[in-house]
Amino acid sequence: MNYFNYFTEVEEHFRNARNSGMFMMSPIDWALVETWKDAGIPLEAVLKGIDRAFEKYHARKRRLSTVNSVAYCTQEVLGAARQMGQVRTVAAQRAPPGLDAPSLAAFFRDRASELRRLEEEGRNGSGVFTQTAATLETLAGEAESGRLDDHEALEQRLTVLEDRVFGAATSALSEDQLLAARRDLDAQLKKYRGKMSAEQIAMLEQRFMRRRSLEELGLSRLSLFYVE
Protein backbone atom coordinates (compact mmCIF):
# COMPACT_ATOMS: atom_id res chain seq x y z
CA MET A 1 0.00 0.00 0.00
CA ASN A 2 1.41 3.41 -0.90
CA TYR A 3 1.30 6.46 1.34
CA PHE A 4 -1.88 8.03 0.01
CA ASN A 5 -3.90 4.80 -0.05
CA TYR A 6 -3.73 4.73 3.74
CA PHE A 7 -5.48 8.11 3.90
CA THR A 8 -8.02 7.46 1.17
CA GLU A 9 -8.99 4.12 2.71
CA VAL A 10 -9.53 5.78 6.09
CA GLU A 11 -11.52 8.63 4.57
CA GLU A 12 -13.79 6.30 2.58
CA HIS A 13 -14.33 3.92 5.50
CA PHE A 14 -15.19 6.79 7.85
CA ARG A 15 -17.60 8.22 5.27
CA ASN A 16 -19.38 4.87 4.94
CA ALA A 17 -19.52 4.33 8.70
CA ARG A 18 -20.87 7.85 9.16
CA ASN A 19 -23.56 7.14 6.56
CA SER A 20 -24.73 10.72 6.26
CA GLY A 21 -23.70 12.21 2.96
CA MET A 22 -20.45 13.64 1.71
CA PHE A 23 -17.39 13.82 3.93
CA MET A 24 -13.84 15.00 3.32
CA MET A 25 -11.11 14.88 5.93
CA SER A 26 -10.21 18.25 7.38
CA PRO A 27 -6.59 19.37 7.91
CA ILE A 28 -6.81 18.24 11.52
CA ASP A 29 -8.14 14.83 10.43
CA TRP A 30 -5.31 14.50 7.93
CA ALA A 31 -2.74 15.36 10.60
CA LEU A 32 -4.24 12.85 13.01
CA VAL A 33 -4.27 10.01 10.48
CA GLU A 34 -0.67 10.85 9.66
CA THR A 35 0.30 10.37 13.31
CA TRP A 36 -1.35 6.94 13.22
CA LYS A 37 0.53 5.94 10.09
CA ASP A 38 3.86 7.21 11.40
CA ALA A 39 3.26 5.40 14.69
CA GLY A 40 2.95 2.15 12.75
CA ILE A 41 -0.75 1.57 13.35
CA PRO A 42 -1.92 -0.86 10.65
CA LEU A 43 -4.74 0.24 8.40
CA GLU A 44 -6.79 -2.75 9.59
CA ALA A 45 -6.65 -1.43 13.17
CA VAL A 46 -7.76 2.04 12.06
CA LEU A 47 -10.72 0.68 10.14
CA LYS A 48 -11.67 -1.61 13.01
CA GLY A 49 -11.46 1.30 15.45
CA ILE A 50 -13.73 3.41 13.26
CA ASP A 51 -16.31 0.62 13.16
CA ARG A 52 -16.21 0.20 16.94
CA ALA A 53 -16.56 3.94 17.53
CA PHE A 54 -19.67 4.14 15.37
CA GLU A 55 -21.14 0.98 16.90
CA LYS A 56 -20.98 2.72 20.28
CA TYR A 57 -22.30 5.95 18.81
CA HIS A 58 -25.34 4.26 17.27
CA ALA A 59 -25.98 2.30 20.48
CA ARG A 60 -26.52 5.52 22.41
CA LYS A 61 -30.11 6.39 23.21
CA ARG A 62 -29.40 10.08 22.76
CA ARG A 63 -27.14 11.40 20.02
CA LEU A 64 -26.54 15.08 20.46
CA SER A 65 -24.70 15.74 17.20
CA THR A 66 -23.37 14.22 14.00
CA VAL A 67 -19.82 12.85 14.04
CA ASN A 68 -17.85 15.25 11.84
CA SER A 69 -14.24 14.29 12.53
CA VAL A 70 -12.06 11.19 12.45
CA ALA A 71 -10.77 12.36 15.85
CA TYR A 72 -13.98 10.96 17.36
CA CYS A 73 -12.58 7.47 16.75
CA THR A 74 -9.16 8.02 18.34
CA GLN A 75 -9.51 5.89 21.45
CA GLU A 76 -11.09 2.97 19.59
CA VAL A 77 -8.36 3.07 16.94
CA LEU A 78 -5.61 2.97 19.56
CA GLY A 79 -7.44 0.22 21.42
CA ALA A 80 -7.73 -1.89 18.26
CA ALA A 81 -4.02 -1.38 17.55
CA ARG A 82 -3.07 -2.55 21.04
CA GLN A 83 -5.27 -5.62 20.75
CA MET A 84 -3.79 -6.55 17.40
CA GLY A 85 -0.28 -6.10 18.77
CA GLN A 86 0.87 -4.99 15.35
CA VAL A 87 2.27 -1.53 15.95
CA ARG A 88 5.42 -1.47 13.89
CA THR A 89 8.34 0.93 13.92
CA VAL A 90 8.37 3.87 11.56
CA ALA A 91 11.49 2.55 9.86
CA ALA A 92 9.81 -0.77 9.19
CA GLN A 93 6.93 0.94 7.39
CA ARG A 94 9.10 3.03 5.17
CA ALA A 95 11.31 2.12 2.24
CA PRO A 96 8.71 1.46 -0.45
CA PRO A 97 9.99 -0.88 -3.16
CA GLY A 98 10.35 -0.14 -6.86
CA LEU A 99 11.66 3.44 -6.71
CA ASP A 100 13.52 3.80 -9.98
CA ALA A 101 16.44 6.17 -10.51
CA PRO A 102 14.67 8.63 -12.88
CA SER A 103 11.71 9.01 -10.50
CA LEU A 104 13.97 9.63 -7.52
CA ALA A 105 16.11 12.13 -9.41
CA ALA A 106 13.05 14.05 -10.62
CA PHE A 107 11.60 14.05 -7.11
CA PHE A 108 14.76 15.53 -5.59
CA ARG A 109 15.12 18.17 -8.30
CA ASP A 110 11.49 19.23 -7.99
CA ARG A 111 11.86 19.66 -4.23
CA ALA A 112 15.13 21.54 -4.69
CA SER A 113 13.41 23.90 -7.17
CA GLU A 114 10.76 24.76 -4.59
CA LEU A 115 13.47 25.71 -2.09
CA ARG A 116 15.40 27.71 -4.71
CA ARG A 117 12.20 29.65 -5.40
CA LEU A 118 12.10 30.70 -1.76
CA GLU A 119 15.66 31.97 -2.16
CA GLU A 120 14.55 34.15 -5.08
CA GLU A 121 11.68 35.48 -2.97
CA GLY A 122 14.14 36.50 -0.28
CA ARG A 123 13.06 33.88 2.25
CA ASN A 124 16.43 32.35 2.96
CA GLY A 125 15.44 30.55 6.17
CA SER A 126 18.82 31.33 7.75
CA GLY A 127 20.48 29.39 4.95
CA VAL A 128 18.52 26.19 5.55
CA PHE A 129 16.56 26.39 2.29
CA THR A 130 19.74 26.95 0.28
CA GLN A 131 21.65 24.16 2.01
CA THR A 132 18.78 21.71 1.70
CA ALA A 133 18.31 22.51 -1.99
CA ALA A 134 22.00 21.79 -2.59
CA THR A 135 21.73 18.49 -0.71
CA LEU A 136 18.69 17.44 -2.74
CA GLU A 137 20.49 18.28 -5.98
CA THR A 138 23.38 16.08 -4.84
CA LEU A 139 20.94 13.27 -4.07
CA ALA A 140 19.46 13.62 -7.55
CA GLY A 141 22.91 12.99 -9.03
CA GLU A 142 23.47 10.02 -6.73
CA ALA A 143 20.09 8.59 -7.70
CA GLU A 144 20.96 8.79 -11.39
CA SER A 145 24.22 6.96 -10.74
CA GLY A 146 22.40 4.18 -8.91
CA ARG A 147 23.94 4.86 -5.50
CA LEU A 148 20.69 5.23 -3.53
CA ASP A 149 19.47 1.67 -3.21
CA ASP A 150 19.07 1.73 0.60
CA HIS A 151 15.62 3.30 0.75
CA GLU A 152 15.24 3.00 4.50
CA ALA A 153 18.45 4.96 5.14
CA LEU A 154 17.42 7.48 2.50
CA GLU A 155 14.02 8.00 4.12
CA GLN A 156 15.69 8.61 7.47
CA ARG A 157 17.95 11.20 5.86
CA LEU A 158 14.98 12.92 4.25
CA THR A 159 13.21 13.03 7.62
CA VAL A 160 16.19 14.93 9.08
CA LEU A 161 16.16 17.34 6.14
CA GLU A 162 12.41 17.94 6.45
CA ASP A 163 12.73 18.63 10.17
CA ARG A 164 15.27 21.36 9.38
CA VAL A 165 13.10 22.79 6.60
CA PHE A 166 10.07 22.81 8.90
CA GLY A 167 11.95 24.83 11.51
CA ALA A 168 13.08 27.32 8.88
CA ALA A 169 9.61 27.48 7.32
CA THR A 170 8.05 28.34 10.66
CA SER A 171 10.56 31.16 11.11
CA ALA A 172 9.87 32.40 7.57
CA LEU A 173 6.13 32.81 8.16
CA SER A 174 4.69 36.11 9.23
CA GLU A 175 3.15 36.59 12.65
CA ASP A 176 -0.28 36.84 11.01
CA GLN A 177 0.20 33.53 9.19
CA LEU A 178 1.26 31.75 12.37
CA LEU A 179 -1.60 33.27 14.33
CA ALA A 180 -4.14 32.22 11.70
CA ALA A 181 -2.76 28.68 11.72
CA ARG A 182 -2.90 28.50 15.51
CA ARG A 183 -6.47 29.77 15.61
CA ASP A 184 -7.51 27.27 12.96
CA LEU A 185 -5.85 24.46 14.92
CA ASP A 186 -7.44 25.47 18.23
CA ALA A 187 -10.89 25.76 16.65
CA GLN A 188 -10.69 22.30 15.12
CA LEU A 189 -9.25 20.68 18.24
CA LYS A 190 -11.63 22.28 20.71
CA LYS A 191 -14.19 19.46 20.77
CA TYR A 192 -11.60 16.71 21.06
CA ARG A 193 -9.10 17.90 23.65
CA GLY A 194 -10.89 16.01 26.39
CA LYS A 195 -10.87 12.77 24.39
CA MET A 196 -7.13 12.56 23.70
CA SER A 197 -4.09 12.41 25.93
CA ALA A 198 -1.67 15.32 26.24
CA GLU A 199 0.86 13.34 24.22
CA GLN A 200 -1.63 12.71 21.44
CA ILE A 201 -2.62 16.38 21.37
CA ALA A 202 1.01 17.51 21.24
CA MET A 203 1.79 15.16 18.35
CA LEU A 204 -1.31 16.23 16.48
CA GLU A 205 -0.48 19.92 16.94
CA GLN A 206 3.03 19.35 15.63
CA ARG A 207 1.78 17.49 12.56
CA PHE A 208 -0.81 20.15 11.83
CA MET A 209 1.64 23.03 12.15
CA ARG A 210 4.24 21.22 10.06
CA ARG A 211 1.79 20.66 7.23
CA ARG A 212 0.39 24.20 7.47
CA SER A 213 3.85 25.84 7.51
CA LEU A 214 5.00 23.95 4.44
CA GLU A 215 1.74 24.66 2.60
CA GLU A 216 1.95 28.38 3.35
CA LEU A 217 5.33 28.50 1.60
CA GLY A 218 4.33 26.20 -1.25
CA LEU A 219 6.68 23.41 -0.15
CA SER A 220 6.06 19.71 -0.66
CA ARG A 221 6.87 16.91 1.75
CA LEU A 222 10.31 15.28 1.74
CA SER A 223 9.39 11.63 1.94
CA LEU A 224 9.75 8.72 -0.46
CA PHE A 225 6.04 8.08 -0.08
CA TYR A 226 5.44 11.18 -2.22
CA VAL A 227 7.55 9.97 -5.13
CA GLU A 228 5.33 9.51 -8.17
Image (tube, helix red, strand yellow):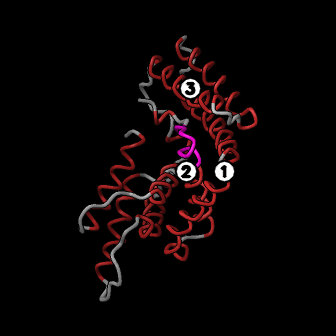
For disc 3, the neighbor class at 10 Å (few under 14, some 14 to 19, many from 20) is: some
Q: Say what amino acid the circle numbered 3 marks.
A: Ser
- Helix or strand or loop: what does disc 2 sit on? helix
Say which element carries label 1. loop
Which mark is in front, 1 or 3? 1
**Distance between the Cα atoms at labels 1 and 2?**
13 Å
Residue 58: give x, y in percent of width and height: 28, 79
Quadrant assignment for the N terminus? top left
In which image quadrant can residue 202 be found? Answer: bottom right
- The residue at the point 55 percent across, 46 percent down is 216
Towards the viewer: 150 or 205: 205
The three-letter amino acid code for the residue at tag 2 is: Arg
Task: Tell me the residue that label 3 is attached to.
Answer: 113
| Magenta-highlighted residues | 211-221
Left or right: where 45 falls relative to 200: left
**Number of other residues with Cα within 10 Å of mark 2, as a class: few under 14, some 14 to 19, many 20 or more:** many
Q: Which residue is mark 1?
A: 174
| Alpha carbon separation for disc pair 2 and 3 | 20 Å
Q: Could you tell whether 168 is left or right of 37 in the image?
A: right
Question: Does 58 sit left or right of 136 as displayed?
Answer: left
Q: CA distance from mark 1 to mark 3?
A: 22 Å
